[in-house]
Amino acid sequence: MTVKLSIVITTRDRRATLVQLLEDLALSLPSPGGGELLVVDNGSTDGTAGALAGRTRIGPYPFHVLEEPVAGQSAARNRAIAGASGEWILFLDDDVRVPPQWASRLVAGLERLSAEAGGGRVDPTWPPKLPRWVATDPARIERIVFVQYELGSASRVLDPVDPTPVGCNMAFRREVLATHGGFMTTLGHTGRRLMGGDDAEMFARLRAAGTRLGYVADAAVTHPVSPDRLTLGYLLRRRYWEGFGAAGHGSPSGRSLARVPSAAWRALGRNLSGAIGAAARTDWPAAAHHLGGVAHRAGYAVGRWARVRS
């Protein structure tokens, strides 16, 4: 039976935050029903299965637990698409918090825009103490690392140059996914491989096909910044894998050196000099940003070499 919307949460070893999110949803889902809630367990070993056992409803919605044995967020998302019955499929990460009426606002906002896919605002929640290299100013924040997405206070159709929504707060009409396929399983988080990018690739594919994408300002979620993200090591690993994933799709043009586009080498040089200059000025956020750029370019080069070998 088709329902209005399917809310999907993919999870792996985040039992505490997942249970907290389910409690949020129990208080915020539209009533009466018209939807369903799916959790895809991607091989958790922390007692997640036991915490979910026996639950048949979350608020007014039927609740289902699906298993995806193939490791990877993109594989888990594709399992959800196969098992969902909603006209709209909404995706949340297992560590976000949602306010009342999040789901109804997101779907209603996209329908008002006549959009077939899109997402809402994502606001990071910061701990009390931050390292001096972390910038919280929206103009300087490391959006990939700290998961921030905000395009203003007004909902609108996305322009071709706008950044696309992020995976912890996004939605698609079912027929769009049926037409254009699921998430690329060569991208997305898998264990310690912090590649990500499966959400960005999906939206890029839809945008190239002419799909109307929307941003819904009042369908916001908050994303707590966990302590493990507040290290330079995490920043460098995350940006490295981002670059590695970017090398796996698209065909670069122009001249190359060692099978890597010359433009990428020039960008690497600019990032190196930028990091040195920022450190000399003691502008630690700028220095971290440029070091992240170095890691990104290094990951891209390794990804290009791996692609050539394959």
Image (cartoon, grey):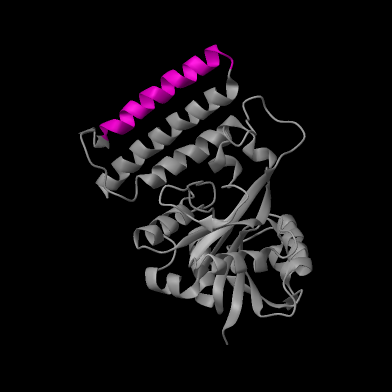
- Where, by quadrant of the figure, is residue 24 drawn? bottom right
Q: Which residues are magenta?
A: 261-282
Tell me if I can see residue 259 in this picture.
yes
Residue situated furthest left in the rendering: 255
Give residue 100's position: percent from left, percent from top: 75, 63
Give residue 170's position: percent from left, percent from top: 56, 60
Give residue 258's position: percent from left, percent from top: 24, 33
Task: Decide if residue 106 is on the left or right side of residue 272.
Answer: right
Whether residue 267 is in magenta: the answer is yes
Q: Who is closer to the viewer here, 247 or 190?
A: 247
Task: Decide if residue 256 is on the left or right side of residue 203.
Answer: left
As drawn, 99 above or below 238: below
Residue name at image x 40 percent, y 43 percent: 244
Residue name at image x 48 percent, y 27 percent: 290
Whether residue 83 is in magenta: the answer is no
Residue situated furthest top in the rendering: 280
As drawn, 76 above or below 83: above
Residue name at image x 59 percent, y 21 percent: 284
Tell me if I can see residue 40 in this picture.
no
